[in-house]
Amino acid sequence: MTDESRPTPTPRTAAVIPAAGRGVRLGPGAPKALRTLSGTPMLIHAVRAMANSRAVSLVVVVAPKDGAVEVKNLLSEHALPERTDFLVVPGGETRQESVRLGLAALPADITAVLVHDAARPLVPVDTVDAVIEALRDGAPAVVPALPLADTVKEVEPGEKGAPEPVVATPARARLRAVQTPQGFDRATLVRAHETIAASGEGATDCAGMVEQLGVQVVVVPGHEEAFKVTRPLDLVLAEAVLARRRANDGF
Ligand code: CTP
Ligand code: MG
């Protein structure tokens, strides 16, 4: 085949999974991503959630700094889809730094990237695919999100435990609680990391950095089961979700 007649390769999507956090809010113990849910490390649940999407051809796990070998061993010990490639890199001091290290490991032919918290082990594959579909439809940045149950107040933060004055009450109907995987055109996300992080700005999620570039981010429906395991009560909820899935599989 000549160069001209060769078809353009289909876009390859990779998932980067930041898993290098300690999990301070979960309390003492192993790094959060390595703690087990129903006997399987949270990280393995998260890796499976990404690899279950047929569009994801590579999963990059950003491991705890000293845990790359342990994570590689875990990946080889657990059953994972054959069609997916896996890479493990050591993480950094912040989530943003860990994501940047994961992006740096991507091969040249990857054009779209999902960034997914290891701490959201139970995201359904339909949510992953909804993010990928919006990317394929041309959005440069896509986040899954849900409407809020609680009303939100903006306050003037005071000393811990002291009454804090309320500054504003944003209209709840316009607010969304953002989850992962967040999906990006690779070049856009890399540019956000190069310019925003270098300026010392940063954001609490990847999409926040892309917004600071002036690029339009869109929201697609998230899922209740994509909640982040943050505090001890979240472990109870995650176990309950897994028990319900097992019960449903039985039918
Ligand atoms: N993360 C990371 N590198 C860091 C910090 C966080 O890869 N230096 C990852 C976590 O492993 C997690 C995701 O970012 O999958 C979301 O972070 P969070 O839920 O805050 O996890 P932790 O930082 O581990 O928890 P905590 O803030 O309670 O310590
Ligand atoms: Mg954290």
Image: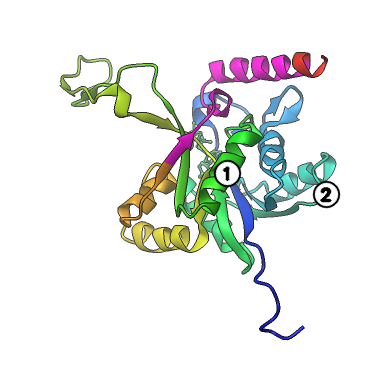
What are the residue bounds of the magenta stretch? 219-246
Mark 1 C-beta closer than 8 Å to ligand 1: yes
Looking at the rendered structure, which numbered label has been put on residue 82?
Answer: 2
Res. 130 in view? yes
**Drawn side of residue 244 relative to residue 129, left or right:** right
Q: Which of 35 and 208 is in front in this view?
A: 208
Looking at the rendered structure, which numbered label has been put on residue 41?
Answer: none
Quarter of the picture containing the N terminus is bottom right
**Drawn side of residue 177 relative to residue 128, left or right:** left
Q: Are marks 2 and 1 in contact (CB under 8 Å)?
A: no
Q: Which of marks 2 and 1 is nearer the N terminus?
A: 1
Q: Is mark 2 on a helix, strand or loop?
A: loop
Q: Residue at x 58, y 32 (%)?
A: 120
Give the x, y percent position of residue 72: 75, 49
Q: How crowded is mark 1: few (under 14 residues within 10 Å), some or many (20 or more)?
A: many
- The vertical placement of 73 against 226, above or below, is below
Mark 1 lies on residue: 20
Give the x, y percent position of residue 199: 31, 60
Q: Nearer the viewer, residue 128 or 31?
A: 128
Amino acid marked by disc 1:
Ala
